[in-house]
Structure formats: C-alpha cells, structure tokens
Amino acid sequence: MGRYTGPSCRLCRRAGEKLFLKGDRCFTPRCAVERRHAPPGDISNRRRRSSDYGIHLREKQKARQMFGVMESQFRAYMDDAFNTPGISGLNLLRTLERRFDNVIFLLGFADSRKQARQLVTHGHFRINGRKTDIPSYLVRTGDAISWKEADKQTEFYRERTDGIPKRPIPSWLSLDQGDMSGQVVTMPPDEELQQSINSRLIVEFYSR
C-alpha cells in the first residue's frame, strides 16, 4: 500500500485526538477533532468496544501517521529498537524524534511534519554544510542544521522564518535566530519523547 494521500484531518478523527498534521489549523476552532468528535465512517455498523488487537493496532497506526512513516520503515525501526540495549519502546520513540524532517518541524522551520518532509526533499536544508534531502536521515549529536544560502534571499525563506520560534524548542536542540540555524545538542531525553504515544502498546503489537 502506498503513502496515504487523503484528508489529514480524517486521520486525527480516526485516532480520536490531534496528530497535528495540519500546522496552525490544529490550534484553531477549525480543527476537525474539535468540530466533529465522532470517527469517520458509517456509525451504524460500529463496534461498541475495540478488541485488544484493535487497541494495539490503533496505537501503532497513530505513531506511523503522526511521523509520516511507511509500514516497512516503521517495522525496521522497531527491529532496531528490539536489538538496541535499553527499553524498546523508548528506543523507537527516540529514533522517530531523530528523523531529519521531524527536527526541521521541531525547530519551527515548517508548520507540520508533512511540510517539513517536503522542504527536506526539495533540498532546502544542509547538515554540517552538506546538502541532505533524505527526510528519514537520523541526526546525531553535534550535527549543525542550516538553510541553503540561496534561500535566504527569497520571500519564501522570510515567510518560513518569520516569528520563529513558533513553538518551544526541545532542550536537546538549539536554535540560533541570528542566521536561522539549529544544532543537535544531545540525544532526545526520555522525558521529552512523544508523550501522546503509548510505546508499550506498539512493542506488544510487534511482539505477537
């Protein structure tokens, strides 16, 4: 199955919570989760209670959709998490947080992870001075992230960087507002990993 190209708000309604897929719209009354609390689909055939498998599957899908990761890549992340010393669930979340497109989103250079993925793919950013157009690239401690120099003279760049920081910057990242560059200070600490995702349910799903 290919990448989902339908309405982003439908995914939020299916998850029953905001996945922040539409940027600033998610913080306004126009958010679909606030306007329509019911999940999409025909309510006449809806089950009253989800099975244990359904609960585990829903949490896995929520994590995939939030970070925009395909199933095969998500499974590879999970395999690495199992083979890495430590708590598998935290290992998975730490890997997702380190994705290049997610870092661009966290630094405020994009309104959503989807937009960040598009900006990275189009080659607007550099890591340690080298062009990097792979959204799934995993950043490391000490990596310096900057805009392409040619972009800094464009209206597009000014629109994207106006008002930064738009959101609080995580402690494991630093932002230099002078030249709009960022740096990975350390690996994401446990307390700053995505709290809305229950990683235990995902680990149990892949442990079946």
Image: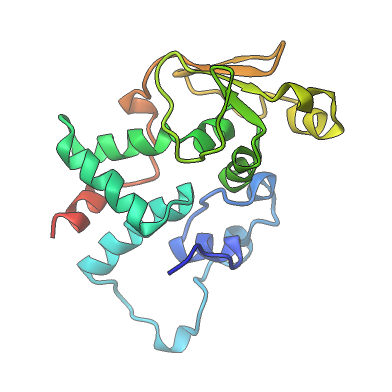
- Residue 43, horizontal then vertical, whole percent: 47, 83
- The residue at 16%/38% (across/down) is 83
- Residue 177, horizontal then vertical, whole percent: 69, 14
| Colouring style | rainbow
Question: Which quarter of the rendered picture does the N terminus lie within?
Answer: bottom left
- Residue 202, horizontal then vertical, whole percent: 26, 52
Q: Is residue 86 left or right of residue 123?
A: left
- Residue 169, horizontal then vertical, whole percent: 55, 23
Outermost residue to the front? 130
Q: Looking at the image, which is closer to me, 185 or 39?
A: 185
Q: Is residue 207 left or right of residue 120?
A: left
Q: Is residue 135 visible?
A: yes
Tell me where residue 72 sits by quadrant.
Answer: bottom left
Q: Looking at the image, which is closer to me, 38 or 67?
A: 67
- The residue at 60%/58% (across/down) is 34
- The residue at 49%/71% (across/down) is 39
Tell me where residue 191 sits by quadrant.
Answer: top left
- The answer to whether 99 is drawn above or below residue 22 in the figure is above
Tell me where residue 10 sits by quadrant.
Answer: bottom right
Outermost residue to the bottom? 44
- The residue at 36%/46% (across/down) is 197
- The answer to whether 30 is drawn above or below residue 166 in the figure is below
How many callouts does the rendering have? 0
Q: Is residue 108 visible?
A: no
Question: Which quarter of the rendered picture does the C terminus lie within?
Answer: bottom left
